[in-house]
Image (cartoon, rainbow, N blue to C red):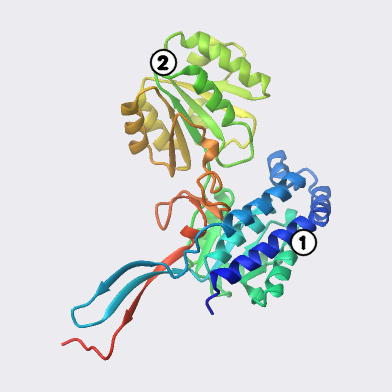
Amino acid sequence: MILSTQTKNAVLNDLATLIADHSSEIIKANKSDLEKAGDLDPTLVDRLKVDEKKVQGMVASVHEVIGLEDPEGKILSSYDHPNGMKVENRVVPFGKILIIYESRPDVTIEAAVSAFKSGNKILLKGGKEARQSNLELVALWKKALAQNEVSEDYVEYLDIDRETTQKLLAENTHKLDLIIPRGGEGLINYIKQTTSVPLMISGRGNNFVYVHDNADFEMASDVILNGKSRLSVCNAIDKVLFNENIPQLEEKINGLVSKAKALGLDVHGDQKITSFDASVTEAEVEGLMPEEFLSEKILFVSTSGIEEAIATINEYSGGHSAVIISSDDESATLFQYEVDCAAVYHNASSRFTDGGQFGFGAEIAISTQKLHFRGPVGLAQLVSNKWFIKGNGQTRG
């Protein structure tokens, strides 16, 4: 059964109202999760915590999706065959999607609203650390669906153990059409090796900024520090490459290090950077380059120029986001075309790699693969296509 856009939006509008009306219950359930979190990593606690602001963010993300065009059924191309057949290519949902994610209860809302409006059914497998929060939110989903006489199986929460999850992945017991793993490389690699279901990879960050020799350094400092304004997100900055020909580089590095340390950042650097500022921890650069920090740590490295910077980023980054700070378009264009990342910025923060910031509201993931889609994935990307052919008895000779 194809749901009309009006019905989908009615469900989502009720969901937004229910979330707002039950904010205290959501926060209470989340407090229960936080109390059980124990010695959970601080970055995971940051992702796990739900406060009034997070609840408001969930409500806003639902309303954003209500305002977006429904992609389901859209005609991509149409052809009138000489024999009288009508040949159309239309947008269709994937079908049934499983998302596996850790810590973040807001994904239970944001992922599901995008999947639902694009016509998919979604199975949610959240981490055990967010169990009470997720169950509370899915109960609201069920209520919104029921209020509009829509099947509750559009949104399902898999409250299952590890063994059952492994069986699901290996045997595709739920007849999945797509799996979206959101987590570390260990989780992603395990799922790759275990299942035959197609994956949309929401990979790691390890994002870079390259500061060109003609950069506005004040702008560069603002962009770099904004890139560490949240530590637990995949669009945060971990590495900064400074062109060694930047005028007064030592003085500028000293000023940036002072600002970074004032914000509580743990600054590491190569030998050239540490020779400029003794307060910077000298790093074993090769060992740190591939690492996604998800912490206060940031690595400053000198580089000979744009070509070396591009090569370094392409070797070590997670393929998520990269930034060039430069005062000319020629170097920026070279960088943006040659750097192999899903989102490549000229003179702007990597923190904008987010569905809401790109204009399509809630996102289900940020894809770092090249097929089927790349970058923030919202409802317009959670679809496939199919050929619809209408004839009146045509046969091929």
For disc 1, the neighbor class at 10 Å (few under 14, some 14 to 19, many from 20) is some
What kind of element bears circle 2? loop
- State the quadrant of the C terminus: bottom left
- Three-letter code, disc 1: Glu
The location of residue 387, given as percent across then percent down, is 34, 74
For the point 70% across and 66% down, which residue is it? 141
Reading the image, the residue beneath label 1 is 136
Q: Is residue 291 visible?
A: no
- Image coordinates of residue 89 in percent, x first then y, are 34, 70
Residue 309 appears in the rendering: yes
Q: In this orientation, which residue lies closer to the viewer: 318 or 256?
A: 256
Residue 244's disc is 2
Q: Is residue 27 above or below residue 11?
A: above
Rendered position, 310 above or below 111: above
Please state which amino acid type lies under the numbered disc 2.
Glu
Nearer to us: label 1 or label 2: 1
The answer to whether residue 239 is left or right of residue 141 is left
* Mark 2 nearby-residue class (10 Å; few <14, some 14–19, many ≥20): some
Residue shown at the point (79%, 54%) measured from the top left: 23
Along the horizontal axis of the image, is 259 left or right of 45?
Answer: left
Place of residue 231 in the rendered image (x, y in percent of width and height, measured from the top left): 63, 35
Q: Total marks drawn?
A: 2
Q: Secondary structure at mark 1?
A: helix
